[in-house]
């Protein structure tokens, strides 16, 4: 590692910690996965800033500290089967792949699916399965899941996703109207029902039904 890369890496991790990402496993995963690989073109040089950035198909790669906070709130265990809705750039799925047994990630834009798959192959992240489809219905074939992470905002937690969560499972997702401030919430399925926790205000692109044309 060159001095410049080491310095950049230290600054990146320092910023994550100062914004509340304190879980050691999450920080190690984010240290291993280079965000720069997931951003193409003009914005690549800003990959290590704590800011969301545009990706293809009019979507965004989330802010690193939000990726970290969502990941640690999910409390992923090494044997877990995780579902992510909204692959986008693939960055969040790659971070999860370091913590879970298997990650299924669904994206409605086929182009983003193709691009993310290429990166996962190049990085040899063999425990990620990337699917083109509408994630608001979850992934019935592979359900139930230990953990579900949604990276696009719905007004309410989608029923099919709640139904695909195991007992003791955790789902983290933004809810609220897309143009307003949304809330990041954590839902835990217990033996007797669902427990909700509100974590913080966030702003995500909307969860949209149906497969996109591109
Ligand atoms: N996790 C991503 C952030 C992506 S932004 C990352 O790490 O880069 C949210 C993504 O959710 C967008 O790419 C958008 O196309 C996708 N999305 C929105 N609604 C969806 C749906 N119903 N099913 C699957 N993906 C969806």
Image (cartoon, rainbow, N blue to C red):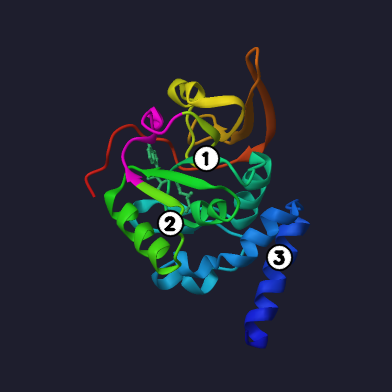
When the figure is inspected, residue 19 is found, relative to residue 155, above or below; the finding is: below
From this viewpoint, is residue 188 visible? yes
The image quadrant of residue 31 is bottom right
When the figure is inspected, residue 170 is found, relative to residue 45, above or below; the finding is: above
When the figure is inspected, residue 42 is found, relative to residue 140, above or below; the finding is: below
Helix, strand or loop under label 1: strand
**Residue position marked by numbered label 2 in the rendering:** 89
Ligand 1 lies under 8 Å from the Cβ of mark 2: yes
| Rendered location of residue 101, percent (x, y) | 54, 47
From this viewpoint, is residue 156 visible? no
**Mark 3 or mark 1, earlier in chain:** 3
Q: Residue furthest left?
A: 213
When the figure is inspected, residue 157 is found, relative to residue 42, above or below; the finding is: above
Confirm or deny contact between disc 2 and disc 3 (CB under 8 A).
no
**Residue position marked by numbered label 1 in the rendering:** 81
Image quadrant for the N terminus? bottom right
**Residue position marked by numbered label 3 in the rendering:** 13
- Depth check, front residue: 124 or 32: 124
């Amino acid at each position: 590692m060159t001095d410049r890369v080491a310095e950049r890496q230290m600054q990146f991790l320092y910023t994550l910690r100062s914004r509340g990402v304190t879980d050691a496993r999450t920080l190690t995963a984010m240290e291993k996965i280079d965000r720069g690989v997931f951003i193409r073109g003009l914005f690549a040089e800003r990959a290590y800033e704590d800011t969301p950035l545009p990706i293809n198909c009019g979507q965004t790669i989330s802010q690193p500290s939000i990726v970290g906070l969502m990941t640690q709130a999910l409390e992923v265990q090494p044997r877990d089967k995780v579902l992510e809705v909204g692959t986008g750039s693939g960055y969040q799925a790659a971070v999860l792949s370091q913590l879970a047994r298997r990650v299924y990630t669904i994206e409605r834009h086929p182009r983003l699916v193709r691009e993310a798959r290429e990166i996962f192959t190049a990085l040899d992240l063999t425990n990620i399965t990337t699917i083109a489809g509408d994630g608001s219905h979850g992934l019935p074939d592979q359900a139930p899941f230990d953990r579900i992470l949604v990276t696009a905002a719905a007004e309410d937690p989608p029923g099919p996703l709640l139904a695909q969560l195991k007992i003791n499972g955790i789902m983290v997702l933004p809810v609220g109207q897309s143009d307003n401030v949304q809330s990041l919430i954590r839902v835990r399925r217990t033996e007797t029902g669902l427990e909700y926790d509100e974590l913080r205000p966030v702003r995500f692109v909307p969860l949209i039904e149906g497969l996109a044309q591109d």
